[in-house]
Amino acid sequence: MASLIQCPHCGARPKEEFSIKGSAEAERPAPDAAEDAWFEYVYQRDNPIGRIEEYWQHTSGCRRWLVVERDSGVHTVYRVLDATAARSSE
Amino acid sequence: MRYSAFQIFKNALGGNTGWKPVWREPEPKPKYDVVIAGGGGHGLATAYYLAHEFGVRNICVLEKSYIGSGNVGRNTTIIRSNYLLEGNTPFYELSLKLWEGLEQDFNFNAMVSQRGVVNLVHTDGQRDAARRRGNAMRMHGVDAEYLDAQAVRDMLPFLDYRNARFPIKGGLIQRRGGTVRHDAVAWGFARGADSYGVDIIQNCAMTGVRRDGNRIVGVETSKGFIECGKLALCAAGHSSHVAEMAGLKLPIESHVLQAFVSEGLKPFIDTVVTYGAGHFYISQSDKGGLVFGGDIDGYNSYARRGNLATVEHVMEAGVAMIPALSRIKVLRSWGGIMDMSMDGTPIIDKTPLDNLYVNAGWCYGGFKATPASGWCYAHLIAKDAPHPVATRLRLDRFRRGYLVDERGAGAQPNLH
Ligand SMILES: Cc1cc2nc3c(=O)[nH]c(=O)nc-3n(C[C@H](O)[C@H](O)[C@H](O)COP(=O)(O)OP(=O)(O)OC[C@H]3O[C@@H](n4cnc5c(N)ncnc54)[C@H](O)[C@@H]3O)c2cc1C
Ligand SMILES: [Zn+2]
């Protein structure tokens, strides 16, 4: 993966400054959603080869949550957005 | 040919021209009773035990690349059965027992070396956890011994004993643990399976699954359609990918794990040592190279290479544990794709489809499991019932709340 990640707030920063949470694709179910919905959300994974969206946190920088779009097959990073911006653009 | 000292002698007299390839390279037949998708250690062991123990012989193993190209040829070769939890200890102990007799059983030198595995402890909390794990092992009839600081020092004089932040307070040793030459494991199982007529089909990827309702009819491959009685998935890092072909979603993420080997050195480290203060473990191969690694990189990946940040972290941890490493040159590094399950424990089970079976979720620890995984999977496929030591390795344990979470990190594989 690229050694430098383009944080929308801090600019190009070393990848080690970021913590990776995991897939940003599944939507968190409502608190009172059925057990099946929670099972899907907590345990099941699409785990695709190719373009994925992930939650990253810029832990050693602005501490904002970001959505990083990258390729799980070749490690290319395509796009980094603030999580709020990523969600409102949908 | 049965290998023996006599054969070596006889072939030497014949100028060593009598050795033959040890498995055939057949074209796929139109139909098999069992198709195994994935020719890694586990797929080959499954084929071997199906034929050798359970009398099922009309089998093919599909391997998209060559035998040994996957994790079976990429791991750091450590075997052990030092697990804490109920569902794990008997399974890994069966595996260790199978390793102990494997070379005689499949008549191949896999260089099984029971040189011991030491887990160092640096704090009172770690000591308590190590003793607890040791006691759990002993209650299952597994060998475990707690070494005090002096015993560790006598055994491993090259560690840094002046580290004020992470003093070495002792260690848990499993003397029956050790290392095995990983390529030879793939080759030995392949040769053994082939001798029973199992077709090992290399450079043949499974690309799709043909279904008739709840039954699998056969598989699409790069060498055409193959009909099957039963389909056994065994694709390690690509488990989600092959399961998806059958319409199945798994509780698995694929992550990259790196490993390293140094230039050849004179005998230096005669056991396996793991650091308790960082993510680092090391052993020395019979060729003299130091074989070591650390943690997974921490992000989903299907690329068989990792990040420099992890390389740096592993080197730092290594030098902190063994200062003498700072002057050693690294020869090679590589990565492998791990099938990380949501509780860190594997899955060997039936699936909601009638004749589809799944073997996956080995994380970074599936090499040691190779014989037991093959044996238990073969048992499941042949008898449609789980082997007694593998009853907790169910696919539906996540839905039902029966996780086997050795690490206690929850459904966050990059923390396992
Ligand atoms: C760096 C590293 C260090 C490790 N260290 C250890 C260790 O010290 N101890 C330990 O116990 N474990 C260790 N492991 C883990 C262990 O190697 C794996 O858990 C284990 O090898 C997985 O099972 P396998 O051998 O069947 O996998 P693999 O050898 O990966 O077999 C899976 C096979 O499936 C094939 N395949 C995938 N998709 C398809 C398809 N569509 N069609 C046909 N074939 C397909 C692949 O090509 C591959 O050959 C380590 C792993 C790595 C990467
Ligand atoms: Zn930032």
Image (cartoon, rainbow, N blue to C red):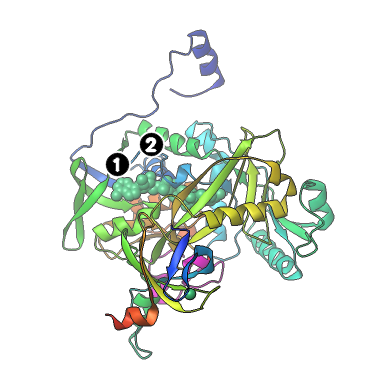
Distance from Cα at disc 2 to Cα at disc 1: 9 Å
Q: Is residue B372 at least partly visible in the picture? A: no
Query: Is label 1 within 8 A of ligand 1 (CB to nearest ligand atom)?
Result: no
Residues packed near mark 1 inside 10 Å, few (<14), some (14 to 19) or many (20 plus):
many
| Chain bearing mark 1 | B
At horizontal 44% and vertical 13% (from top left) the residue drawn is: B17
Contact, mark 2 vs mark 1 (Cβ under 8 Å): yes
Q: Amino acid at mark 2?
A: Ala
Reply above or below: A24 against B205: below
Numbered mark located on residue B240 in the image: none
Q: Nearer the viewer, residue A78 or B49?
A: A78
Q: Is residue B217 at least partly visible in the picture? A: yes
Residue B201 in percent (x, y) is at 29, 37
At horizontal 18% and vertical 40% (from top left) the residue drawn is: B30
Numbered mark located on residue B193 in the image: 2
| Chain bearing mark 2 | B
Q: Nearer the viewer, residue B276 or B183?
A: B276
Q: Nearer the viewer, residue B269 or B407?
A: B269
Element on which disc 1 rests: strand
At horizontal 39% and vertical 78% (from top left) the residue drawn is: A82
Q: Amino acid at mark 1?
A: Ile
Q: Which residue is mark 1?
A: B59
Element on which disc 2 rests: helix
At horizontal 46% and vertical 44% (from top left) the residue drawn is: B72
Confirm whether the magenta stretch covers residue B411. Answer: yes
- Magenta range is B392-415
